[in-house]
Image (cartoon, helix red, strand yellow):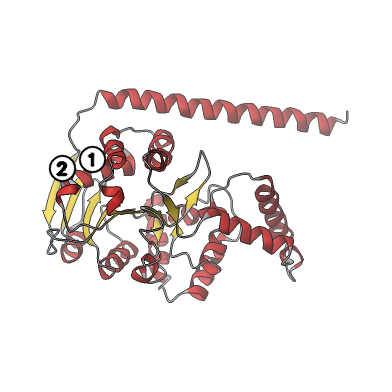
């Protein structure tokens, strides 16, 4: 065997072994974190509370919106999102995991929200969702409540009118709607935007799931047991879950563009982009589940009309998806959204990161 081939094989085995150990370590830490959560108090972690100018009484639509910023700022892109939720008819419960909230941010929130709370950053988004839901009291006693939305600030957007979009979320087709779904770790709706119809809110499966949620300080546990687990629990409870921009549609669209649309033969296609499209096509063809909100981000926005872009994709790009730097041109070609909202947040985040 040539030396290069031998070294390559050894390197590959070493990397595979490292990855297996990494996964085992993450799962072990997750179980340790869960065990630690059992010892925590059973009450909520709310530390401050403010009433806004809006009211929850009699609301047909309520959104529990989770926020985090280590400097306590509610950035312009978040305020825009909240305003769009208000225009779509949602009364807002704003739950922040930040260590504090600035006076300017509170003043802005006051006019938009019915209730704002700041809590200790324990349990990630699902801990915050649980505390936010507890503030509403028994949902069955809110007779006028038709829809409940759980959302967070992990996305930029919306790039399109939410009221128009949500008219597609028909209660006759599904009781629980997400923007996107995923098959990684098992089928589930991605938790950055989850819309529950009244049938779901009155379901024993919904209530039972939130009763068993603990404040676990492990992202692995939260993703596997709570994000994936929520969809599984609701489906087991007889509820239909659906995505407005499903993974299969995006994956099929990209695959068809390669197979029949001549995407790999497009003029000016560079070697890197060619290799990336080939990798996507091969992964889809093998049935390998990908994170569609990352790998198919541009197709979702430009071809399917998806109203959101994951913030992590621009800040960290963990999957090393190429051409993410074209985000502004993709958004501007697809909507009238002010991309400066994203640019200002990126600049502020980089400044804070370097400080």
The residue lying toward the viewer, choosing from 52 and 244, is 244
The x, y position of residue 258, in whole percent, is 71, 61
Q: Residue at x 12, y 59 (%)?
A: 57
For disc 2, the neighbor class at 10 Å (few under 14, some 14 to 19, many from 20) is few
Q: Tag 2 or tag 1, which sits nearer the N-term? A: 2
Res 120 label: 1
- Identify residue for label 2: 47
Please indicate, yes or no, whether residue 261 appears anywhere in the rendered image: yes
The residue lying toward the viewer, choosing from 83 and 345, is 83
Please state if 219 lies on the left or on the right of 265 as rendered: left
The x, y position of residue 62, in whole percent, is 23, 58
Per the image, label 1 sits on a secondary structure element best described as loop
Give the Cα separation between the discs numbered 1 and 2.
7 Å
The x, y position of residue 244, in whole percent, is 45, 60
For disc 1, the neighbor class at 10 Å (few under 14, some 14 to 19, many from 20) is some
Pick the quarter of the image with the N terminus. Answer: top right
Per the image, label 2 sits on a secondary structure element best described as strand
């Amino acid at each position: 065997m040539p030396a290069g081939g031998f070294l390559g094989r050894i390197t590959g085995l070493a990397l595979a072994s490292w990855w297996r150990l990494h996964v085992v370590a993450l799962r072990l830490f997750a179980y340790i974190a869960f065990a630690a959560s059992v010892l925590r108090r059973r009450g909520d972690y709310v530390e401050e509370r403010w009433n806004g100018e809006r009211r929850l009484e009699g609301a047909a639509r309520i959104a529990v919106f989770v926020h985090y910023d280590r400097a306590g700022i509610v950035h312009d892109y978040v305020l825009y999102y909240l305003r769009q939720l208000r225009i779509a008819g949602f009364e807002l419960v704003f739950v922040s995991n930040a260590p504090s909230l600035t006076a300017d941010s509170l003043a802005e929130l006051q006019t938009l929200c019915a209730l704002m709370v700041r809590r200790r950053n324990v349990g990630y988004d699902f801990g915050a969702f649980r505390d936010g839901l507890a503030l509403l009291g028994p949902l069955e006693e809110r007779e006028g409540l038709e829809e409940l939305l759980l959302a967070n600030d992990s996305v930029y957007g919306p790039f399109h009118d939410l009221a128009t979009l949500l008219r597609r979320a028909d209660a006759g087709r599904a009781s629980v709607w997400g923007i996107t779904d995923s098959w990684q770790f098992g089928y589930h709706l991605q938790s950055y935007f989850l819309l529950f119809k009244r049938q779901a809110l009155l379901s024993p499966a919904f209530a039972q799931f939130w009763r068993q949620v603990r404040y676990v300080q492990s992202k692995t546990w939260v993703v596997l047991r709570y994000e994936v687990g929520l969809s599984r629990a609701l489906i087991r409870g007889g509820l239909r879950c659906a995505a407005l921009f499903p993974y299969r549609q995006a994956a099929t669209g990209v695959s068809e563009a390669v197979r029949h649309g001549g995407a790999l033969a497009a003029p000016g296609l560079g070697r890197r982009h060619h290799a990336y499209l080939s990798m996507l096509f091969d992964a889809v063809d093998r049935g390998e589940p990908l994170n569609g909100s990352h790998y198919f981000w541009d197709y979702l926005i430009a071809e399917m009309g998806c109203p959101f872009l994951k913030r992590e994709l621009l800040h960290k790009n963990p999957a090393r998806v190429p051409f993410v730097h074209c985000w502004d041109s993709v958004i501007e070609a697809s909507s009238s959204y002010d991309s400066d909202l994203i640019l200002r947040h990126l600049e502020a985040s980089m400044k804070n990161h370097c400080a």
